[in-house]
């Protein structure tokens, strides 16, 4: 394995660790020193942004609520498996922007998995709103990192193309699909 690939992997792991730590620190700060630890407790920071404590027992958008201990641990296992898949993908990815995006997804996933395993719910607290219109459900740093990471991956998959053999001047190689 070459040095560049090792550095790329370490960058992905550092991004994942940074997202995880920032997520856990902000959750601690909101529920600890700020004292927002009762459902829907809130603190207005800006006219369009409140800190609002929400216990999220489901997954994305509150889907699949864990209404029992069995469901809670099933979600921990399911999301843990997905996080392991992301880690595996990240370990094999060569392109730095994709590794960074996967690191964001991995760090966010691990932060939310830790909450669910430790507390039985995920701590959400960021409430962006414009008057009564809320474009998002209450979320946290992990949710934002996962969303941004997935959007980067999607954007790159749709709009960023690597040079093909023909564009780079190398001879084209026929394969079974093109034959």
Image: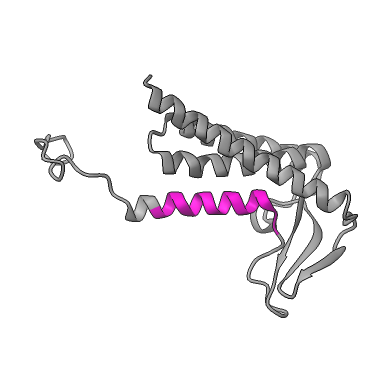
Residue at 40% x, 22% y is 3
- For the N terminus, the quadrant is top left
Residue at 74% x, 75% y is 47
- Magenta span: chief secondary structure: helix
Taking the view exactly as shown, the residue that stands out farthest to the bottom is 131
Residue at 52% x, 49% y is 149
Q: Is residue 52 left or right of residue 4?
A: right
- The image shows residue 151 at horizontal and vertical percentages of 48, 54
- The image shows residue 67 at horizontal and vertical percentages of 80, 49
Q: From what the image shows, is residue 100 above or below residue 56? A: above
In this orientation, which residue lies closer to the viewer: 129 or 78?
A: 129
Residue at 57% x, 34% y is 14
Q: Coloring scheme of the render?
A: one colour
Q: Is residue 66 left or right of residue 105?
A: right
User: From this viewpoint, is residue 82 visible?
Assistant: no
Asked if the stretch drawn in magenta spans residue 141, the answer is yes
Range shown magenta: 139-155
């Amino acid at each position: 394995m070459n040095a560049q690939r090792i550095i790329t992997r370490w960058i992905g792991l550092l991004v994942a660790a940074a997202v995880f730590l920032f997520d856990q620190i902000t959750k601690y700060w909101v529920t600890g020193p700020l004292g927002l630890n009762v459902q829907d407790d809130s603190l207005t920071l800006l006219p369009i942004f409140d800190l609002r404590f929400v216990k999220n027992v489901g997954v994305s958008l509150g889907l699949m609520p864990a209404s029992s201990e069995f469901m809670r641990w099933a979600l921990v296992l399911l999301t843990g498996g997905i996080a392991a898949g992301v880690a595996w993908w990240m370990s094999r990815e060569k392109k730095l922007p994709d590794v960074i995006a996967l690191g964001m997804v991995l760090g966010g996933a691990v932060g939310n998995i830790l909450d669910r395993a430790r507390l039985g719910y995920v701590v959400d607290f960021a409430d962006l709103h414009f008057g009564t219109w809320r474009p998002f459900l209450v979320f946290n740093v992990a949710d934002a990192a996962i969303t941004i990471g997935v959007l980067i991956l999607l954007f790159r998959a749709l709009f960023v193309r690597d040079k093909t053999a023909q564009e780079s001047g190398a001879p084209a190689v026929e394969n079974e699909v093109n034959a």
